[in-house]
């Protein structure tokens, strides 16, 4: 479990000047988590990035640290949840928000309570909603029932519904909530000695670990800058595809020699790769090849489009339609998985892939709230 994350326990870690001009105001930056730190100026709160620059403006009455890509904020007395680019996952319209597992929050509006999710879904009427349990209850709280952790929903007539917390994943799956194959487990964070709170990849290492897609390399290390091999990429692809398809690959012990044999066989059987696609599974994989592998999973194929294909093709200038991997590359941009290596959305198809970069791609594949709108 990670002990390097705190909410407000770290005090005055760094003090920076927002400008070198005379009369510039100072703002205070507190402890970093997942690449961002709480920052305060004149009683208003925002977030600073890993360089100490203000990334999310001073506008909130209070904030908590980012954890698994979300942070609760208080805007003029109303609670909401943001992601690291400042966009709202839950609009600031609630009188209180109490975090639970799986991206769920117990929510209050006036004298009514319910449970909301950071990921929207379609309800029985086909309308987009974030309410898992509607905001109509007299109270919603967690506690013990028969020795099990449970959610208690008390209606305004005094009737009580008890939902064991272990049933919530099934509830979300039955509602077809996007990302329900890769649910977040509150508090389950790694403690890599080579990943610091101010690192840009800290968020992705956390989510990839939390969702079971990636783990460390041993001895408490993540090795974020080490290049990913073909074998490691196929292991990740098989893990993600297995989870999405309900196969048992990701729950089965694999003792084959070499260690990646079962992952290769899964990817072959699932048509994620062909038998002639790779002749050396121990070598480094390129960004082009990783896009082909990840793009061939059923998970990637199932994702909705969120960016214009025409605009992607025009913007990504180092990939042409003649590239044999163009379809996979463009598709991952269109679906908000790839964001490029710079502000020009460059892909660098022949470059190797670091473990930090692979974690970012895997985390966006798994978690819909972290996918990116490229053109806003």
Image (tube, helix red, strand yellow):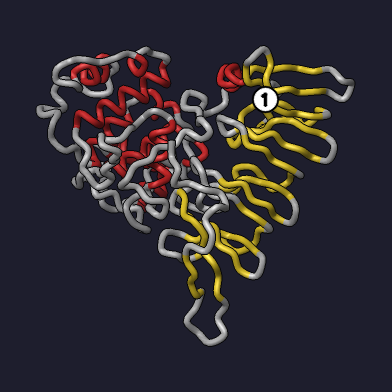
Q: 10 Å neighbourhood of mark 1: few (<14), some, or many (≥20)?
A: some
Asked whether residue 174 appears in the rendered view, the answer is no
**Which sits in the foreground, 239 or 327?**
239
Farthest right residue? Answer: 157
**Which sits in the foreground, 138 or 310?**
138
**Which sits in the foreground, 242 or 188?**
188
Query: Where's residue 186, x and y in %?
Result: 53, 33
Q: Answer left or right for 94 relative to 361.
A: right
Query: Where's residue 235, x and y in %?
Result: 27, 26
**Residue drawn at 38 percent across, 23 percent down:** 298
**Residue drawn at 59 percent across, 64 percent down:** 40
Q: Answer left or right for 236 relative to 281.
A: right
| 288 relative to 342, above or below | above
**Residue drawn at 79 percent across, 40 percent down:** 109
**Splitting the image into 4 quarters, where does residue 116 fall?**
top right
Asked whether residue 85 appears in the rendered view, the answer is yes
Query: Where's residue 267, x and y in %?
Result: 26, 20
**Which sits in the foreground, 269 or 131?**
131
Farthest bottom residue? Answer: 22
**Residue drawn at 28 percent across, 40 percent down:** 221
Please give the count of numbered marks on the rendered protein: 1
Q: Quadrant of the N terminus?
A: top left
What element does badge 1 sit on? loop
Farthest left residue? Answer: 279
Q: Answer left or right for 127 relative to 137.
A: left
Residue under circle 1?
123
Q: Answer left or right for 272 relative to 208.
A: left
Query: Where's residue 325, x and y in %?
Result: 25, 37
């Amino acid at each position: 479990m990670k002990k390097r994350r705190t909410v407000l326990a770290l005090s005055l870690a760094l003090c920076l000047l927002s400008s070198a001009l005379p009369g510039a105001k100072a703002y205070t930056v507190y402890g970093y988590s997942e690449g961002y730190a709480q920052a305060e100026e004149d009683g208003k709160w925002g977030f600073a990035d890993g360089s100490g620059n203000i990334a999310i403006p001073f506008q909130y009455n209070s904030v908590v640290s980012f954890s698994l890509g979300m942070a609760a904020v208080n805007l003029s007395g109303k609670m909401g949840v943001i992601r690291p680019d400042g966009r709202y996952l839950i609009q600031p319209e609630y009188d209180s928000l109490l975090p639970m597992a799986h991206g769920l929050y117990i929510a209050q509006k006036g004298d009514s309570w319910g449970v909301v999710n950071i990921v929207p879904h379609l309800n029985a009427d086909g309308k987009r909603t974030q309410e898992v349990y509607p905001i109509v209850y007299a109270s919603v709280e967690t506690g013990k029932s028969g020795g099990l952790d449970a959610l208690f929903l008390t209606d305004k007539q005094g009737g009580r519904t008890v939902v064991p917390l272990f049933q919530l994943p099934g509830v979300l799956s039955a509602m077809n909530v996007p990302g329900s194959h890769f649910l977040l487990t509150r508090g389950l964070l790694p403690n890599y000695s080579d990943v610091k709170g101010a690192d840009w990849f800290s968020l992705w290492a956390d989510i990839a670990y939390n969702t079971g897609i990636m783990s460390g390399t041993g001895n408490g290390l993540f090795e974020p800058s080490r290049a990913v091999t073909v074998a490691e990429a196929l292991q990740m692809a098989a893990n993600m595809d297995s989870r999405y398809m309900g196969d048992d690959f990701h729950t089965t012990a694999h003792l084959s020699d070499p260690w990646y044999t079962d992952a290769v066989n899964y990817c072959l059987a699932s048509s994620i790769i062909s038998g002639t696609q790779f002749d050396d599974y121990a070598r480094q994989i390129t960004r082009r090849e990783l896009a082909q592998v990840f793009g061939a999973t059923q998970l990637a194929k199932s994702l909705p489009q969120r960016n214009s294909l025409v605009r992607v093709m025009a913007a990504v200038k180092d990939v042409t339609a003649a590239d044999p991997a163009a379809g996979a590359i463009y598709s991952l941009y269109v679906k908000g998985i790839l964001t490029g290596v710079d502000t020009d959305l460059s892909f660098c198809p022949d470059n190797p892939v670091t473990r930090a970069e692979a974690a970012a791609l895997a985390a966006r594949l798994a978690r819909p709230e972290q996918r990116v709108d490229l053109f806003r």
